[in-house]
Amino acid sequence: MAKYDNNFVDELRARLSVVDVVGRRVPLVKKGQNYWGCCPFHNEKTPSFSVNEEKGFYHCFGCGAHGDIISFVMNSEHVEFKTALQELADMAGIKMPDYKPKSPERQQLEDSYFGIVEKAAKIYQDLLFSDSGKDALEYIKKRGFTDDMIKKYRLGYAPKNNIISNKFVDVKQNNLLATGLVRNGDYGLYDFFRNKLMFPIFNPKGQIIAFSGRSLDGSEPKYINTTDTEFFHKRYTIFGFNFAREEIYKKNRSIIVEGQIDAIQMQCNGFGETVAPLGTALTEDHIALLCKSNRNIIFCFDGDNAGQKAAARACSLVLPFIRDNSDVRFAFVTGGKDPDEVLKSGGADAMNKIINDSLPWIEFLWKHINESYLVSTPGGRTQAEKFLENELKKIQDKKYQYEIEQEYKKREFQEWRSWKKVDTPNIKMPDVDLITKNTLVYIVNNFENLASQYSDFLSSLNINFDEQAPDLGWTVTQAEKFVVSLKLKKYLEILENERKEKMQAMVNGENYTNADIAEINKKITETNQKLEKLLYME
């Protein structure tokens, strides 16, 4: 078999979850950290086939079958390596390149790239502790960074001059340009990063692949990142992931914050499972990478409008990755603070409270919809329902999707359509009998428009409409006759009680007259006539 370019194969493994690939053919159930099912490679009734999402492999304890997404497709579908790659590429939604054996030139470029960025990181780190980097060092220490933190994350300083261009004069110009550390100008090469606090960016293997530079003079943008290269793509790279992988596995969750400093401070203050996007909007590729480690995610954003919008976008992105055993939540840092400031002022306890108060995604999405649409109007409800329908279609597990849809339909009915309860302070409605109750439950659950039309009356009966009731097979006319007749009967009860109370009041000498009683009698007669007419209606 020819030797193929590992970059594309690695990208497939990064984009696709082994649980999703295997799950297309094998029903899987999560137990502990692994997923289990019956092995597709030999007959068995008791599941011995284990799938580890974080590590990206499967293993059968019965027959010994073992491998990753590529070997699974090859062995389960009996296809060759290239065909398996093509199928996986289609799943991932990426174009499969023409494969060729890795050339010596290509290998030389890779070695050169990683060698240059590694050496550059050492140069920047040394400069941070030099006289030229004293302002950058003072700034980061004011942000609460210790020397150990600086060394662990390999922070550095890019000076105002062309340090990289001058240090790498013996390197091929094209190789140096390929790293994104320098640009080609009218007078030769010049450094891309100048007067910046430097944050190295690592790939999951712990290799430095790029840098993020923070402005020190107040200029905008506050952060700039290495432009995309052959070995670095912002949309596929999560800051701090190489440090967080083990903690994500141990704590069975990941936390996503908005910036590098927040991520580092979180990791160093007891939240080692924290990561951040690289100053860019969160992407579905970031989510895919995290979900390969764990599908339990807490998004932690600022509580302002921008943070709320970012959270709404994150919720939309994460829906295709949610499973029925996922725990996806949204936490918000209020008061104009960020996680870094919370940790400084209140420590880990304050941050823990914010995390513990996080909203499950179902609650967050419902809250977001109610705040984004005018659900008190028919038009607003229609827009909200269309939005919700489109969002829930993204859930891949159709059974889970159905359950969430039913949950929201119940909320729509109770909160948007029917249950605007009216106060009836002087009227105590009597309880209904079991047959009447079951009949009303059936009507409410099967005739939405009718339930909405008579919502004020139905809501006053103190019935739990979430229960189940036998199917009566009624038409809407039959259902409406029943509701209206019950409403009239209840009204008659109120009138009868009112007549008794006023007659007793007259006996007690209170200021009521025969005319008052006559008025009530007139209403009783009219109501009885309506009821009789209703009962004989077709």
Image (tube, rainbow, N blue to C red):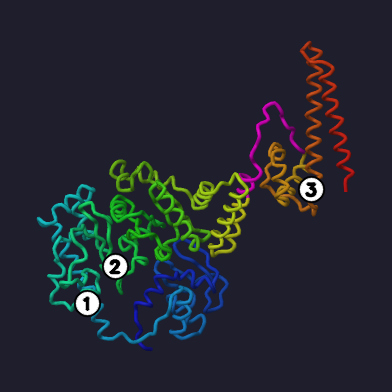
Height in image: 410 above or below 87?
Answer: above
Q: Residues within 10 Å of mark 3 (few under 14, many from 20)?
A: many
Residue 227, which numbered label? 2
Q: Residues within 10 Å of mark 2 (few under 14, many from 20)?
A: some
CA distance for labels 2 and 1: 15 Å
SS for tag 1? Answer: helix
Q: Position of residue 440 (x, y in %)?
A: 75, 45
CA distance for labels 1 and 3: 78 Å
Q: Which quadrant of the rendered structure holds the N terminus?
A: bottom left
Height in image: 74 above or below 166?
Answer: below
Sequence-first tag of 1 and 3? 1
Q: Residue furthest left?
A: 131
Q: Residue at x 14, y 56 (%)?
A: 133
Q: Per the image, is 511 magenta?
A: no
Name the side, left or right, on which 520 lies relative to 244: right
Q: Which residues are magenta?
A: 410-432
Q: Residues within 10 Å of mark 1 (few under 14, many from 20)?
A: some
Q: Nearer the viewer, mark 1 or mark 3?
A: 1
Residue 479, which numbered label? 3
- Asked which quadrant contains residue 280, the reply is bottom left
- Callout 3 amino acid: Ala
Q: Per the image, is 418 magenta?
A: yes
Q: Position of residue 432 (x, y in %)?
A: 76, 37
Task: Answer yes or no: is residue 64 visible.
Answer: no
- Callout 1 amino acid: Asn
| Residue that carries the numbered disc 1 in the rendered image | 175
